[in-house]
Image: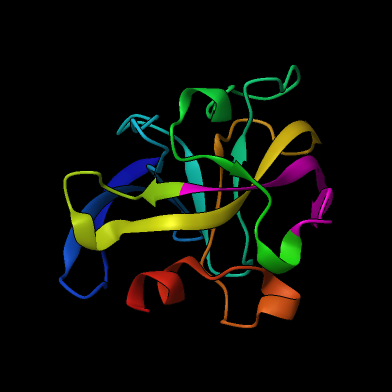
């Protein structure tokens, strides 16, 4: 895995150090909650082919990490608008089981233009096939029926 700088375009441009895997997959940080949970070395797959933002939950026994603890966030809420009934997501051979939460999310907590207040994401508490990741940041097309809540559109709105 090599490190390359990739530009993520937001209202004001912000530069991130993403881990580039053979120009096929990119990994970078994500932060959640109030106070913010996470670290700059977190391992989120920035995926242009999917839509949901997913994160490992504190109760996930078979996950790479237990990244997000909704009970430690003052701004966490269970559920998110049209997605309250989502309990499972499939990505190729990976299956994630959990539920939707709403909380504050940042790609860089020092850069407010990369933060979304009360954004909906999927917290998984069991998984198969998603080893080695803290979660996935879906950057797919803005089609909420197919792809789920769109983080970049949420930042722009």
Please state the horizontal and vertical placement of residue 131, each as a whole percent of the image.
68, 31
- Is 100 or 26 nearer to us in this picture? 100
Please state the horizontal and vertical placement of residue 110, each as a whole percent of the image.
16, 45
Q: Which residue does the image show at 37% across and 59% down from the upper left?
A: 116
Question: Would you place residue 32 above or below residue 60 in this image?
Answer: below
When asked about the image quadrant of residue 53, the answer is bottom right
Give the main secondary structure, helix, strand or loop, of the magenta stretch: strand
Residue 73 falls left or right of residue 5: right
- Is 51 or 43 nearer to us in this picture? 51
Q: Quadrant of the N terminus?
A: top left
Q: Quadrant of the C terminus?
A: bottom left
Which residues are drawn in magenta? 84-103
Outermost residue to the top? 61
When asked about the image quadrant of residue 152, the answer is bottom left
Residue 122 falls left or right of residue 70: right
Please state the horizontal and vertical placement of residue 140, each as a whole percent of the image.
57, 73
Q: Which residue does the image show at 70% across and 20% down from the upper left?
A: 59
């Amino acid at each position: 895995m090599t490190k390359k700088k990739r530009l993520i375009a937001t209202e004001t441009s912000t530069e991130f150090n993403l881990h580039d895997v053979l120009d096929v997959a990119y990994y970078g940080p994500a932060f959640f909650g109030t106070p913010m949970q996470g670290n700059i070395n977190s391992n989120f797959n920035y995926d242009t082919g999917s839509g949901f933002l997913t994160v490992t939950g504190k109760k996930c026994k078979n996950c790479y990490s237990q990244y997000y603890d909704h009970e430690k966030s003052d701004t966490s809420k269970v559920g998110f608008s049209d997605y309250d009934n989502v309990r499972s997501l499939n990505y190729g051979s990976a299956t994630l089981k959990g539920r939707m939460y709403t909380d504050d999310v940042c790609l860089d907590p020092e850069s407010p233009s990369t933060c979304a207040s009360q954004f909906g994401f999927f917290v998984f508490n069991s998984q198969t096939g998603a080893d080695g990741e803290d979660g996935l940041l879906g950057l797919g097309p803005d089609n909420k029926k197919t792809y789920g809540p769109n983080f970049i559109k949420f930042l722009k709105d």
